[in-house]
Amino acid sequence: MRIYSWNVNGIRSVAKKDCLPWAILPGAEVICLQETKAQPQQIPDLTDPEGWHGAWHSAKKPGYSSVAILSRDKPDEVVPGLGHDDFDVEGRVLAARFGTLVVITAYFPNSQELGKRLDYKLAFCAHLEGYLAAWRAKGCQVVLLGDYNIAHRPIDLARPKENEKNAGYLPGERAWMDRYLGLGYRDVFRERNPELAGAYTWWTNWGGARQRNIGWRIDYATVSPDLVSRVQDAAIHPMVMGSDHCPVSIDLG
């Protein structure tokens, strides 16, 4: 099973660029999307592409945040949200269960300039921990894909020194990633590529950053410890265009 995750920065935007994920991502069986910026009634032609089952969880505010999962096989269960109104109103989490495998797409809050939303983000992270634990308590294996809006370590961004006080690389955010991995969840891409620099998933639109590969790795596919043995590959796809993010993928056997 090949699972992709991609922050498309607007599903209507990638549609206009002929970069619809289900049309351009090879071998995809499940596609997790973030920042679709649309409610289903706004995109009736895109909600259920031919050959796919679509599930969408949108923010109440039009054109904001929102996530989706598209899959070749129909999920046994679809669960929108964390079960907490403060976060679910922004359309940030959606789960699809296939047997005992739970695929989760998540769009983590941006902590914003001067850490304006850092408390909100860390509260989201704390609730997410409990949410994942609840799935695992049911005997499920989980894979959490999405835009975490966190570069974990200096190797995960091109200019760590210059960004120590910037959103996405704040000490509190990085400390939460330490905590999360300390709970046993596995950043399989970094484990398999421990010294690989320049492996980024997001680039600012300014100054030719993508062409110069001045980027950040803030999109991840992490798995519960009981799922590690099924991971066959984990990859980043910087050649896929259409958004300021590129897709990441994980292959499960």
Image (cartoon, rainbow, N blue to C red):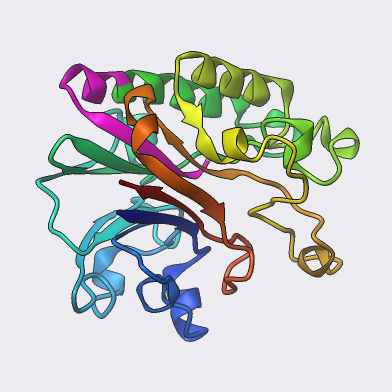
Report the front residue among 209 and 248.
Answer: 248
Q: Position of residue 110 (x, y in %)?
A: 59, 40
Toward the viewer: 47 or 222?
222
What residue lies at 68% left-to-right and 35% top-to-bottom? 194
Q: Nearer the viewer, residue 166 or 42?
A: 166
In the rendered image, residue 37 lying in the magenta stretch gets the answer no
Task: List x then y, in percent, for residue 208.
Answer: 83, 69
Q: Is residue 33 visible?
A: no
Where residue 242 sits: x, y (%)?
57, 74
Q: How many marks?
A: 0
Q: Nearer the viewer, residue 186 or 33?
A: 186
Residue at (75% x, 53% y) in the render = 215
Instruction: Specify start and end residues of the magenta stretch as a single range.
Output: 133-147
Q: Would you identify the image quadrant in which residue 99 lies?
A: top left
Q: Seen in the image, is 64 located left or right of residue 246?
A: left
Quadrant assignment for the N terminus:
bottom left
Residue 70 against residue 104 in the figure, above or below: below
In the picture shown, does residue 243 fall above or below 87? below
Is residue 146 highlighted in magenta? Answer: yes
Q: Relative to residue 214, is residue 193 depicted above or below?
A: above
Q: Residue furthest left?
A: 76
Task: Please identify the residue farthest to the right as the structure is shown.
Answer: 162
Taking the spot 30% from the left edge, 24% from the top edge, the residue there is: 131
Give the x, y percent position of residue 50: 19, 79
Residue found 82% across the figure and 46% down from its top = 158
Can residue 98 be seen here?
yes
Q: Is residue 102 left or right of residue 147?
A: left
